[in-house]
Image: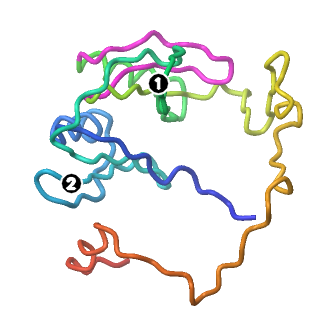
Amino acid sequence: MFQFTGIHHVAFATKNMEKTTRFWRDLLGMRLVFSHGEEGYRQYFFEISPNNLISFFEWPQVEKVAIHRHGDPVTGPFAFDHVSFGLPDLESLWTLAGRLLAADCPLSDVTNHGFIHSIYTYDPNGIPIEFSAAVPGMDVRKNPLIADFPATSVGQEGSQPLLHLWPPPEDIPHEERLVIQGDGATVFDKHAIRE
């Protein structure tokens, strides 16, 4: 079985890359590690942690999303509620809360969810963001807790993946393993950046 390293990146859209960069890089402190494109279509990647990035496409015609309170049920087509970023401890959460307040960002109270404490805000594009710090001794990764009642039949099966329920992976022959050129590849070819 393969091992995931985390979410490599999530990609959002913005109409204003300057405001977006000011928020994610300069307010939150996430390094801008890659950008490419041109006016009308560009993409920026910001480093969340050693294994995780967040990305934005700049599209001139995109509009800021309507404010949706994190976790409130909706009806109709919907695909995304919020994204949460982990912090190492509660003190870091309070420090970030102070930073967001000083920047006049909308900010919730600190919420105790039992295994995490969280604050909620929005980026300049209206994207709902949560910041979470683990409660010491309450690691659901080490001690999963399935506590909905009644639990769904699938939830009652426990926390471990049941990989045997799906077909085994197909073996893709080496001669069929094709890699197509993406937009960013030409940027790296042009700049000859290698480790």
Q: Amino acid at mark 1?
A: Leu
Question: In which image quadrant can residue 5 be found?
Answer: bottom right
Answer whether residue 111 is magenta in the image. Answer: yes
Answer whether residue 127 is magenta in the image. Answer: no
- Residue at 43% over, 19% down: 120
- Residue at 73% over, 27% down: 138
Residue 36 pos. (x, y %):
22, 61
Q: Is residue 176 above or below residue 52?
A: below
Given residues 184 and 144, the one toward you in this image is 184
Task: For label 2, count other residues whose C-alpha is less than 10 Å away and answer few (under 14), some (14-19) or many (20+).
Answer: some
Given residues 51 and 97, the one toward you in this image is 51
- Residue at 41% over, 50% down: 53
The answer to whether the residue labelled 1 contacts the one labelled 2, judged by CB atoms less than 8 Å apart, is: no
Which is nearer the N-term, disc 1 or disc 2?
2
Question: In which image quadrant can residue 3 be found?
Answer: bottom right
Residue 162's disc number? none
Residue 95 pos. (x, y %):
40, 23
Q: Residue furthest front?
A: 76
Residue at image mark 1: 93
Foreground disc of the pair 1, 2: 2
Residue at image mark 2: 42
Q: Is residue 9 above or below residue 120?
A: below
Question: In which image quadrant can residue 146 be found?
Answer: top right
Given residues 161 and 40, the one toward you in this image is 40
Q: Quadrant of the N terminus?
A: bottom right
Task: For label 1, count other residues whose C-alpha is less than 10 Å away and answer few (under 14), some (14-19) or many (20+).
Answer: many
The boundaries of the magenta stretch are 104-124
Q: Amino acid at mark 2?
A: Arg
Numbered disc 2: secondary structure:
strand
